[in-house]
Image (cartoon, rainbow, N blue to C red):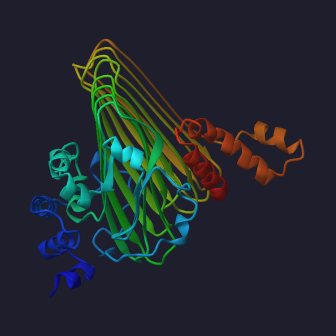
Amino acid sequence: MTNAAVAQEALTARPSTELVEAIAERFDEPTWLRDHRLAALAHYAQKAWPSGQEEPWRRTPLDATPLDDWVLALSDGVSPASFEGLLPEAPAGAVVQVDAGLAGLELSPALAAKGVILLPLSQAAREHETLVAEHLNSILPIDDPEPGSGRFTSLSSALWTQGLFCYVPPNVAIDETLYHLMGKTTANAGVFGHTLIVIDEGALATVVEMTASDPSDGASLAQRSVEVVARRGSQLNLVQLNAWGDDVHVFTTTHARLGDGTRLVNGSAAFGGRLHKDRVKIEVGANGSHADLFAVFVGDGRQHIEHYTRQVHDQPGSSSELIIKGALDGDSEAVQYGSIHITPNGQRTNAEQTMRNLLLSDGASADPIPVLEIEADDVKCAHAAAVGALDPEQLFYLESRGIDPESAEGMVVHGFLTTLIDRLPDAHTRDLIEKFVERKL
């Protein structure tokens, strides 16, 4: 069977060596990257899917997820209708990928002259081999040891086709936003991605990643890994927007390692997908390093939206904050499991987490679980979690002034979420998210 035939074959069992080699050949990847993929495939074969007994997976309903029954999305798809309006006009930098095709690539000459790199990951592996090889899977290893999670990481490490590499050189400050837009046109698809972002010392950047697809029959699997290396004194704003169609089961794993005095804003906005699960781990540096994590979501129908976060403080004098806010309608459900882990080395840490869920129907439910693991004695930690319905007094106030009940409910929900939306550093993305909120309501 030819490589092309293998690549298009419907997979109902383990991915094969032939398939991985076909992907590497399709993207003209260097030998080291092909071997890297094959090593990930070997780890995938040795691992099992979550049993549901592991703590990170106890609350994740995987029964309907097509873990082994999908077709690898390798066509050069035409951009779906759902892409309309997602990118601003003439962005300073953007990579657009549909299925396994490159639908758009641009970077302003001014940024390129400063040494900024924004490329599909396969292309970057050819053109900037030393830089990519040094960092690929350095933060999130292909043999991810987290219980139940390793097979997801190994699978995307072996089969990714929607890859991004972003590098910002030392002391380069990018005022414009860089975009990565991903989608699919294949039904019953397996869509795999890997993002590698390296922000060098003293640099500043904003990166927005967006996923979207048109509604489709059947069920699709989307697994992405995101690695962030943020060196001493750098600043990164990273936002991930999920607008997949309701046939997609979405799994995104983000790991970041921050240098001393580094600031990271990591935002998530979840609106699409049948199942959405974010796994986020931030290793916070020392001496004023700060991680600001937030997530906003609106669920409806029978959506399951889950956030599993870890704020890890293994060095002194750092801080982090997690805020999650969401609204749930229909029979949708949400889970937040947030852990703050402060090791004995993490003295003078200040860490907080807040989880707030607004229920818009009797069938909606939420389960926020804040966890503190503190092994140091000179720290400040706080956590808060809440689940509640709309405030009837607020609704009464608005309706008494002539606002119809549906509009009043939308205004209350929008006001509840706006405090987080306003924290986004990118005006275009803020406007997009507000539109998604209105559409879901």
Residue 222 lies left or right of residue 15; in this view the side is right
User: Quarter holding the C terminus?
Assistant: bottom right
Residue 49 appears in the figure: no
Residue 28 lies left or right of residue 186; in this view the side is left
Percent from the top left, x then y, of residue 59?
A: 38, 51
| Residue 18 picture quarter | bottom left
Percent from the top left, x then y, of residue 362?
A: 63, 53
Q: Residue furthest top?
A: 378
Percent from the top left, x then y, of residue 300?
A: 58, 59
| Residue 390 picture quarter | top right
Q: Residue furthest bottom?
A: 1
Residue 269 appears in the figure: yes
The residue lying at 35 percent from left, 47 percent from top is 112
| Residue 337 picture quarter | top left
The residue lying at 37 percent from left, 71 percent from top is 99
The residue lying at 85 percent from left, 45 percent from top is 399
User: Quarter holding the N terminus?
Assistant: bottom left
Note whether 294 is above or below 163 in the view shown. above
Note whether 359 is above or below 85 in the view shown. above
Residue 362 lies left or right of residue 17; in this view the side is right
Percent from the top left, x then y, of residue 373?
A: 30, 27
The residue lying at 27 percent from left, 81 percent from top is 8
Judging depth in this view, the residue of 118 and 197 nearest the camera is: 118
Judging depth in this view, the residue of 66 and 122 nearest the camera is: 122
Q: How many marks?
A: 0
